[in-house]
Amino acid sequence: MENQLFISINGSENIKNSLLHMFKAMQKLSPEILHPKQIRASVITHWLKNYNLRQVQYMAGHKYVSSAERYQLNNQDELQSKLEKLHPLNVNK
């Protein structure tokens, strides 16, 4: 049991109910979280901002790098500035 990341409330190795209770408690704090996959996606997205793609692939346990690439978000501010800079109607300004 020492090498487990999570342990159950009663100390058994079956942690399914404990994770469910933990998730329900998180939902009370943040009702916009509808599914545990949202938490995983936000963690992977955070990692992509701080680590290179191969490190994130390894940390997330993805077999293929393309799986980690799916979590890359386009930075809206960066896209907006590129649009303003490169749009044909803005070139002469």
Image (tube, rainbow, N blue to C red):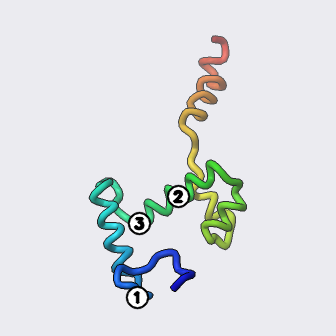
Q: Which quarter shows the C terminus?
A: top right
Q: CA distance from mark 3 to mark 1?
A: 22 Å
Q: Residue at x 44, y 79 (%)?
A: 7
- Contact between marks 2 and 3 (CB within 8 A): the answer is no
- Determine whether the residue tagged by mark 1 lies in a helix, strand or loop: loop
**Disc 1 versus disc 2: nearer the observer:** 1
Label 1 neighbour load within 10 Å: few <14, some 14-19, many 20+: few
Label 3 neighbour load within 10 Å: few <14, some 14-19, many 20+: some
Q: Which numbered disc, 3 or 1, marks the residue that appears first in the sequence?
A: 1
Instruction: Identify whether 57 is placed above or below 80.
Output: below
Residue that mark 3 sits on = 36
Q: Nearer the viewer, residue 3 or 78?
A: 3
Residue that mark 1 sits on = 12
- Contact between marks 1 and 2 (CB within 8 A): the answer is no
Quadrant for residue 14, please give it: bottom left
Q: Nearer the viewer, residue 32 or 24?
A: 24
Quadrant for residue 45, please give it: bottom right
- Relative image position of residue 17 (x, y in whole percent): 34, 80
- Relative image position of residue 72 (x, y in whole percent): 59, 52
**Disc 3 versus disc 1: nearer the observer:** 1
Q: Residue at x 35, y 79 (%)?
A: 9
Residue that mark 2 sits on = 43
- Determine whether the residue tagged by mark 3 lies in a helix, strand or loop: helix
Q: Which numbered disc, 2 or 3, marks the residue that appears first in the sequence?
A: 3
Instruction: Identify whether 49 is placed above or below 76.
Output: below
- Determine whether the residue tagged by mark 2 lies in a helix, strand or loop: helix
Q: CA distance from mark 2 to mark 3?
A: 11 Å
Q: Nearer the viewer, residue 37 or 70?
A: 37
